[in-house]
Amino acid sequence: MAVPKWIQLYKDKSLGGDSGTETFPIKRTDQILEMVLKVRAKNGSASNSVDAAAQETVQKSITKIQVASGSAIFKNYSGEMCRKIASYRNGKTPEALITQRQGGTWVGNGDPLLGWQEYVFPINFNLKNDPYGNKTGIIMPAPLYDSLDLVLDYSFTISSTAGFVTGGTNHVFDLYALVMPREAKEVMETKRILVETKKHDYTTLAAGDEPFKLTLDKNRFLRQLYVQCYEAGVGEGVDVTDLVLKANNDVIWASKWGDLQAQNALDVGFDELVMSMYLESISTTDEIWTRVPAARPLYSPITEEAYTIITTVGDKVTMAASAGAKDGRLAIYSSVIPAIVVMDLDKDNALMNMQHQGINDLELLLTQGGADGTVQILEQSVAKPWGYN
């Protein structure tokens, strides 16, 4: 009888520096169902507080997570997109410890006053309703491959007041994997892999429809399509108002941005708490860019001065307090998964209604309503194993 087990691939592994690209080999003895990457970083010696600009977080600093075997790429997304996919899958934002307090000594107990940030990045090769791959055969058959690597692109902003402490030993990760025993080669060749790769980056214009070509591959089926759109201080559904998905010029999905977000939240029973940040102000009106376009903030004082006024414009939350006020917690709620929509072609997880990608044309059309929105388009496909001998 096959028994799944959790193994630790890397423990307290320091990155090589403050920025760069590093490759970490992944053990290929067993088949892999999922991996969990936990990255933590030490805040600056005074604080990590940013006013009226993007907050410096571990999530922002992990610019690419990739799982690949040579030229065969199975996962390719930013840290933020990795967590967005998990939010839709699980109906809950993955765990994160976000604090602005000055960096101290990490002791691994999640204490925000110690001044370390820690983010969880789930990397799934299985389906939520089939966690061990027994029913669907969706799993990473790692023993088929001569190599399998985790590639991280990262760039940590170094600052005593608005970033992190320099040095790879202050940027550390753990990596875990849920695995099942290997099977005969001919059996593993019948498995299928859940592939997630970024297809397009784009900046919106003030108006007009913009088409995007999607992957054509006879060995793949499109299961979910993710579209992220964000601009600081701009609400949901402004820069992109409508979406249309076409297969061989036949419309198979059409929706407004806001309507699709609401449906996504309903489909997965989304938990409205998106983030929780422990604060330390650096001005009398700190403006925090939360990346939650329709943010609903709630402030809770802990031991010191309470913030007296909270105002919001899009994702920008302004906190009024005296400089240096701290020991308060800002909770950000959202009724939808922020800044993203999902076209889900497999809501029942039966793998029976996906769009075959071995066709002549597959296209996404976005209707633009405002300029300067940053768009990412990412495909999730079910594919046969490839890229091995």
Image (cartoon, rainbow, N blue to C red):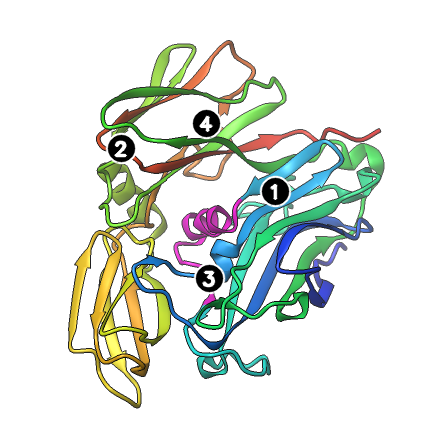
Q: Is residue 372 left or right of residue 142?
A: left
Question: How far is the residue under mark 2 from the one under mark 4?
Answer: 35 Å
- For disc 4, the marked residue is 353
User: In terms of sequence position, does the residue under pointer 4 or pointer 1 come before the other?
Assistant: 1
Question: How far is the residue under mark 1 from the one under mark 3?
Answer: 38 Å
Q: Is residue 1 left or right of residue 237?
A: right
Q: Nearer the viewer, residue 317 or 158?
A: 158
Query: Mark 1 or mark 3: which is in front?
Result: 3
Q: Is residue 294 left or right of residue 326?
A: left
Percent coordinates x, y for residue 1 in the rendering: 77, 55
Q: Tell me if residue 289 is in the magenta stretch.
A: no
Residue 57 got which mark? 3
Q: Residues within 10 Å of mark 3 (few under 14, many from 20)?
A: many
What is the magenta range?
78-96
Q: In the rendered structure, which amino acid carries the disc numbered 3?
A: Thr
Quadrant of the drawing holding the C terminus: top right
Which residue is at a point 48% across and 82% down the rendered structure image?
Answer: 111
Q: In the rendered structure, which amino acid carries the disc numbered 4?
A: Asn
Query: Mark 4 or mark 1: which is in front?
Result: 4
User: In terms of sequence position, does the residue under pointer 3 or pointer 2 come before the other?
Assistant: 3
Q: Is residue 101 left or right of residue 293?
A: right
Q: Reply above or below: 97 against 84.
A: below
Q: In the rendered structure, which amino acid carries the disc numbered 1?
A: Lys
Percent coordinates x, y for residue 247 in the rendering: 42, 15
User: In terms of sequence position, does the residue under pointer 2 or pointer 4 come before the other?
Assistant: 4
Q: Reply above or below: 165 against 55.
A: below
**Main SS class of the magenta portion in the image:** helix
User: In terms of sequence position, does the residue under pointer 1 or pointer 2 come before the other?
Assistant: 1
- For disc 2, the marked residue is 371
- For disc 1, the marked residue is 135
Question: How far is the residue under mark 1 from the one under mark 2?
Answer: 45 Å
